[in-house]
Structures are given as C-alpha cells and as structure tokens.
Amino acid sequence: ADHVSMTDRRFEVGYAAAFEAFTEVLESRKEGLGGSWFTAPGESSREAFMRRVKRSDPAYEIYAAYSAEHTERWAGAKALTLDAAMAEMPEVERKYQLECAEYGNVLFGLSDEFSSAGKIEQEQLAKLADLGKLQAQLDSGAYVAIEGAEKIRQAEVLTKAVEAFETGKDKAVDAVLATKLPALDRKK
C-alpha cells in the first residue's frame, strides 16, 4: 500500500522527483545485477558494504577490522533449536543489561557533549550536598533522581550513586581505550 496516497499527503515537488529518480536507479541496478540491487551475484552483504567504502575513508581500517572479526566469529556459529534459544535467554538478557550500562558509561565518558554537561550537573549536585541543600531539593521535587526503577529520596544515597557512576564510568572508558583489536594492530 502507498502510505502517501492512503493518507492523502503529498511530497514537495523536489522531494517527489528525487525519490522517483532514486527508485529508478535502484530498479536499474536490479537488472544489471541479476535481480539484486545491493549485492552482486554470489557476494555477501559484508563484501558489498566493503566494496562501497572508499579506501581513503579514515574509518576504512576500522570497518575492515570489524568485518574480519565478524566473519571469524560467525564461522563457528551453530543453529539453535527454539528450546535451546529460550534456555539461553536469561543469560543473553543479563549480558544485554551489562552492555547497556557500559554503553552509558562510555557514552558519558567519551562524548564531549555529554561529559561536559554531566560534569556541570555533577559539580552542581556536589555543591548543593556540601551546602546541605541537596536534601531540600530532593524533597521539593526540584531534583528527581532515579536508580534502576527506584526513586532516590536521600541526598546521601544520591551522592554515593553519583560517585559510584563516576568511578564506573572512568573504569569503563579506560577499558575501552585500552582495548586492542588484533586486526588493526596487524595493519600498522
């Protein structure tokens, strides 16, 4: 179904012309590539992607290393039955939660935008705690702190949570920056 027609919306003329030209390019590729517009016959999606990345791209070596590691790891993959997959789910979910926490640590540790904003907020919380005003801010609702699924109601608990986050964040960033990818090391 055509969403635009069904909702009686129209694209701007320029957009409509660009979309039409783009779909024509995709359709013309299909004929030339034996029905495939992304991969050439016998080519994997990994190979198709790497074929399109310019060797002059600063991230080319990173993509190539990731691609090699991906291929190596998937070479030993095995199919699971539904029951086996369901039995693995609790462990997969546990690892997912850990990965999400580490992602947050790394994001707030490495991103200049997030880390500078977080640093300002942390200093403001520390100043309020030092002046004995943080508890009043929490009680009035001016500040709301959540950890997990629980609201933090005590200034002391919040201060310790912020300190623990900072410590964990710094450790995660150090671990990420110390990580060596053998595929990248070989290229040097």
Image (cartoon, helix red, strand yellow):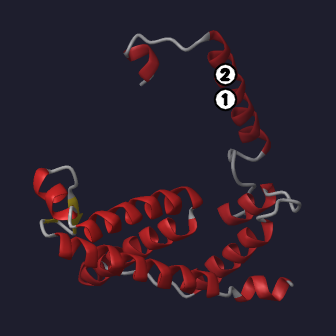
Q: Position of residue 31 (x, y in %)?
A: 75, 39
State the image quarter where residue 103 is shown.
bottom left
For this rendering, which residue is in front, 92 or 181?
181
Q: Residue at x 67, y 74 (%)?
A: 66
Tag 2 and tag 1, C-beta contact below 8 Å: yes
**37 relative position to 94: left or right:** right
Mark 1, residue position: 23
Q: Position of residue 98 (x, y in %)?
A: 36, 79
Which residue type does callout 2 highlight? Answer: Glu
Q: Residue at x 86, y 84 (%)?
A: 188
For this rendering, which residue is in front, 53 or 77?
53
Q: Residue at x 68, y 73 (%)?
A: 67
119 versus 77 height, above or below = above
Q: How many other residues sit within 10 Å of disc 2, few (<14), some (14-19) or many (≥20)?
A: few
Indicate which disc residue 119 carries: none
State the image quarter where residue 101 is shown.
bottom left
Which residue type does callout 1 highlight? Answer: Thr
Q: Position of residue 16 (x, y in %)?
A: 62, 17
The CA span between labels 2 and 1 is 5 Å
Question: Is label 1 in a helix, a strand or a loop?
Answer: helix
Question: Is label 2 in a helix, a strand or a loop?
Answer: helix
Q: Residue at x 44, y 72 (%)?
A: 105
Farthest residue, direction front: 131
Q: How many other residues sit within 10 Å of disc 1, few (<14), some (14-19) or many (≥20)?
A: few
Mark 2, residue position: 20
**74 relative position to 161: left or right:** right
For this rendering, which residue is in front, 136 or 149?
136
